[in-house]
Image (spheres, rainbow, N blue to C red):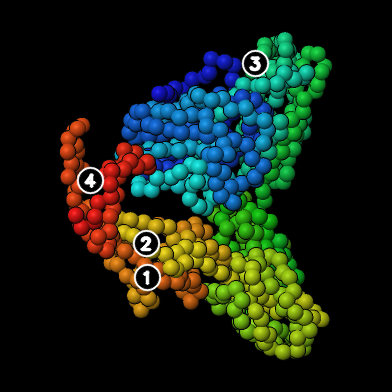
Amino acid sequence: MIIAMLAACLALPAYPVTIGEGNELNRRPLDFYYKNSLNETLYYPDEIGFTGMINAISLHCSFVTDLPGMPVKIWMGSTILPDLSGGWIPSTQLVPVFDGVVDFPSGEHEIFIPLQNHFEYQGQNLVVMFNRPMDTSYYSSSNRFFGQTGTIPRALNIYHDRTLFDPANPPATTASASFAQTTFHMTITEVSPDPTLIYPQSVNFGTVFLNTTQYRQIWVSNTGEGSLALNSISLEGSPCFSLQDLPDLPQSLSLWEWLSFQVNYNPTSYGDHSATISILDDTGRALHSIPISGCAPDLEVAYPNGGETWLSGTTETIRWPSFPTEVDIFLSYDAGTNWTALATTDGLSGFYNMTVPALNSSQFKVKLVSTSLPDDYYDESDGTFTISTNPTLPRVIMTHPSNPNLHFEVGEPLNITWTRSNLTSVSLDLSTDDGLSWQEIVSGLDADSYPWTVPYTPGLNFRIRVRSVTNPAVADFSDNAFSISRIQLLSPLGGELLTSDYSNGYTIPITWIAPGMATVNCEYSPDGGTSWISIGSFVAGSGMSNWYLPGVPSDNYLVRISNAANPSINSVSGTFNLRNPLRITHPQVGGFATNGSLINIRWINQDVAPGTSVWWEYSLDNSSWTRINANANPVDS
């Protein structure tokens, strides 16, 4: 048995590599609010920085209760998969590195877990699986780990109080970008002819706002034979970067010894910035260069920016370069003297679609303002633009699909309609990204409608555009985005025989695929579809829900999955049977027995043919079962 809870370093020289910012709290990779959990996460070579032997792993926790001696299992492995959107990598394809107990004290701690089997990391994507085996108790939901949410679906996570998860065959679930902040303690396994190890080898600060400061730590280590002396560390490039906490140089490093310093990014002007850190050793073996980059974003109106003409009743798109805060959008009717609020929207999207009002003026402007940054983060159109209701101008107006909350099914016939004046031939285009880009459906139509079959491209942000063939600037598109979806029930399909009892305590998984929708409704019918009872609403992409079987036997059960936004888009199972064969009345939950004592097993026959014989079994771990009776007993005995 291994018990581990320390915030220390290995006795062997080791490099702690911490991955993740730890700017949020979550119940990953171990969920103590449920009795059983399973978590798997990918870590990438550019995050780890070098190859070597992983000797230990640390988790960073904030617990409200003391949890000593908690069973934990860990596996590690390598993969070429870029993420876990395709599902679990089972434990049978990984290496077991820890199977023991760990202490989790209350408060904020780094939990140090020395691995029983060290894992040799050779530079691919690292896979780490954590398992909290089925426990008899669950604890506070506030026992959490520091973590973060990125953009890559790199993690899988499941938890339950009744379902025992098998790491070798985990149930399907949806990948997430949320994972625990994790520290790997590693030793270098190769001796390099150039003993200078730099980590990280490049730094990209990403987006940093004007006059704010971000920093990164740089480590320099000796991984070769003999000593290493560093002569100089210098920085060239943008003055927005600076070095801090530099060591006294020259300085010698013995084998495995390391030093660190800090690079700061404090942008004082908008735009992209770059610099280079140079590290020179005493032998001249190499001048090590670390490229540094960052960007200070500016909020800027790209369209309309002056000189444009918009026709009332059409839909136009206000555009700006992607900006990392929400923005308020304003419209001026008098060249910027007064402003009217239009909307607040996500600045990262870089666009906002608006219906042009029925007004006539050449003095319009648009203004963008950050909702959370200082007043200097705003911009307005450089010049004025025109909105016109002039009936003599060529005009086309999309009429369907254009209303809000439209949801269509793959393969559904859809009649696209529009109105036009002072033009003849038009083209139709389809956008799958809310109007950012377009692909042509058909061209050269001298009509006001077009029969279209909804394509097999499920998604949430479709629009259709109608435009003049001779003057593409005369155009209009759907006032609102619509969705295209498809749903398919995977299980149960019909014909199954399910068993339960009258306690409503048995579950089976209902599984589906539902691209192009946000939420699904799950229902069952006990009478072949005459009536329907709600099981619940679920995230469509989760693909699974555990259904607590009802206690009413029937030969005509159905399950139905439907699009919550449009229930007519649905998938229904065939009929299946539900039987409640036996109900155990003794022993029940909460009882106890002494070693060698005699226990009477009592039951009620609810749905088993008289004369049928049954076996009785017991389990000590809710997983494996041992037969009690040497000979099968009649169910009515």
Element carrying mark 1: strand
Element carrying mark 2: strand
Marks 4 and 2, how far apart at CA = 23 Å
Image location of residue 631, percent across then percent down = 28, 47
Which residue is labeled 4 in the image?
589
Q: Say if mark 4 contacts mark 2, CB within 8 Å.
A: no
In depth, the one of 235 and 174 nearer the eye is 174
Which residue is labeled 2 in the image?
498
| Amino acid of disc 4 | Val
To which quarter of the image does residue 267 belong?
top right
| Amino acid of disc 3 | Trp
Marked residue nearer the N-terminal end (3 or 1): 3
Q: Is residue 333 visible?
A: no
Image quadrant for the C terminus?
A: bottom left
Determine whether 597 is above or below 329 in the image: above
Q: Is residue 442 visible?
A: yes
